[in-house]
Amino acid sequence: MKIQKNISFIGYSGHAYVCIETAQLLGYTVTGYHDFQELEQNPYNLRFLGPEEQFEQHDGFLFGSIGNNNIREKVFRTISAIKRDMFVSLLHPSATLSKTATIDTNVLISAGAIVNALSNIGIGAIINTGAIVEHECTIKAFAHIAPGATLAGNVTVGKRSFIGAGAVVKQGVTIGNDVIVGAGAVIIKDIPDNLTVVGNPAKRLIK
């Protein structure tokens, strides 16, 4: 007998659509979404379940599907303080995941992504479509590795950092917290906290 797995989503826009389709492929029944208000655009015809804080009566799983790293963290921290065990990770069936990789909760690993041996993926992280996370990398909580980015072995990406589409990070590099790496950038040395870097080789963007 097949057991029905219900799931609802916190946040319902672009990034959430990828999460929803991944959940459906994994056999979840999507029961609705939470957001700050009911949204006119509803491509999956989901039921509005109320604001983010109205989750107490939910009897299935939850997934924080907000693309913004800071907001995703804030919402997750608030809800998980009460019911952390409601959250799950969504690992696309076409992703390649090492059996020695460690993956925390509320993680999305999208189609075609690769997570290799002994890597650690932190709470709420996003490994987006076709991204490569090589051996022994550490992706800290609520970081986002965008489509097509490549991290060589032993790379560390700090909390809430964003690695842009197609970026390449050299082996052994440490990227700090709250860093933004521009699309296509090539990172060959460590990046301190709170910087935005672009280019090949990547340099600090002066705003």
Image: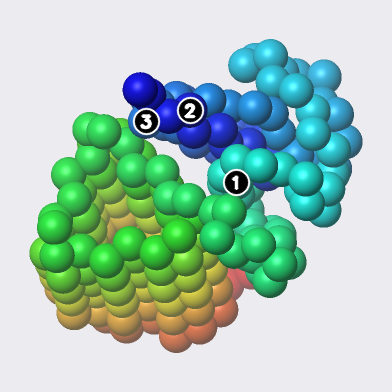
- Residue 62: mark: 1
Is residue 39 visible from the viewing direction of this image?
Answer: yes
Residue tagged 2: 4
Question: Element at badge 1?
Answer: strand
What is the number of callouts on the image? 3
Q: Earlier in the sequence, mark 1 or mark 2?
A: 2
Tell me what residue is drawn at x 57 percent, y 44 percent: 61
Q: Quadrant of the C terminus?
A: bottom right
Q: Is residue 30 above or below residue 53?
A: above
Q: Residues within 10 Å of mark 2 (few under 14, many from 20)?
A: few
Q: Is residue 28 above or below residue 41?
A: below
Question: Element at badge 3?
Answer: loop
Q: Residues within 10 Å of mark 3 (few under 14, many from 20)?
A: some
Kindly indicate whether the residue at mark 2 contacts the one at mark 1 (C-beta within 8 angstroms): no
Query: Label 3 amino acid?
Result: Leu
- Residue 26: mark: 3
Query: Label 2 amino acid?
Result: Gln
Residue toward you, 144 or 39: 39
Residue toward you, 191 or 140: 140
Query: Label 1 amino acid?
Result: Leu
Tell me what residue is drawn at x 27 percent, y 66 percent: 102
The quarter of the displayed image where residue 147 is located: top left
Tell me what residue is drawn at x 85 percent, y 29 percent: 38
